[in-house]
Amino acid sequence: MSDPHILLIGESLALGMPRHDMLPEYHKWENDARTILGYGNQWAQSWEVRAAGYERQRGNERYQQFEVVRLTDNAAVGMTVLQVNTYVRTAEFVIVLAPDERGKGHAAEAARLTLDWAFHLAALRMVWLKVLEPNRAGVSAYEKAGFRRSGRLRKSGYWLGQPVDELLMDALPEDFPGPSAVTAALGD
């Protein structure tokens, strides 16, 4: 495996460039039963579909991906994505964590670092996400990162085979809880 290319350093995690040689590991994370449940999907994604999707995504400047790296050992522990709408300067946020790295506080820090990048480097006006209402751990992590509840899509998702509401959450630059790793890296 290649070494991570670190872009932004936080307290215990960093954001890095996604690595092609990590694609099989990313694919495993995305096809974990808890990930499928959290995304509201019903099916695993084949390797061929994921590999082709990676090639399309990496050439699309509106699909900004970050590998989440643990600083103590430079291990990849997750991915975050900003699906950017360049016309209105907003983005949808998506996260996946390695199954054995969940419950360790990584989601909140990874989301905060991604918001830091989105607001202080990409100059986005707003970042939003959808989360299934029963995913209490996800909602809590997103709130710690600066997201606020902004709406609901009634019965639009599935949790353990049952229709559930999806919560809409968003964050504006003034919601960012700080401290900013971007301004720290610049010495400001």
Image (tube, rainbow, N blue to C red):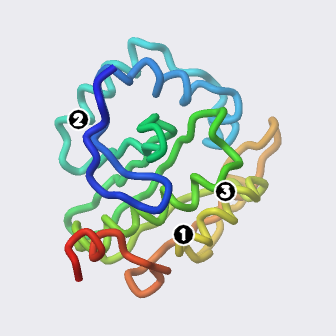
Earlier in the chain: of badge 3 and badge 2, it is: 2
The amino acid type found where label 2 is placed reads: Arg
Q: Which residue is mark 1?
A: 145
Instruction: Give SS at disc 2.
Output: helix
Q: Amino acid at mark 1?
A: Ala
The residue carrying pointer 2 sits among few (fewer than 14), some (14 to 19) or many (20 or more) residues within 10 Å by Cα, namely some
Label 3 crowd bin: few (<14), some (14–19), many (20+), radius 10 Å: some
Between 2 and 137, the residue placed more toward the observer is: 2
Q: Which mark is residue 120?
A: none
Using the rendered view, name the quadrant where residue 101 is placed. top right
- Label 1 crowd bin: few (<14), some (14–19), many (20+), radius 10 Å: many
First reached walking from the N terminus: tag 3 or tag 1: 3
Mark 3, secondary structure of its residue: helix
Between residues 144 and 127, which one lies in front from this camera angle?
144
Q: Nearer the viewer, residue 124 or 69?
A: 69
Residue 78, position as x, y percentages in the image: 49, 40
Residue 88 seen from this side: no
The residue wearing badge 3 is 138
**Mark 1 or mark 2, which has the lower sequence index?**
2
In this picture, residue 88 sits left or right of residue 14 = left
Quarter-of-image position of residue 97: top right
Q: Amino acid at mark 3?
A: Gly
The N terminus lies in quadrant: top left
* Left or right placement of residue 183 versus residue 82 in this view: left
Gap between marks 1 and 2 measured at Cα: 26 Å
Q: Which residue lies under the disc numbered 2?
A: 58
Whether residue 49 is situated above or below residue 81 in the rendered picture:
above
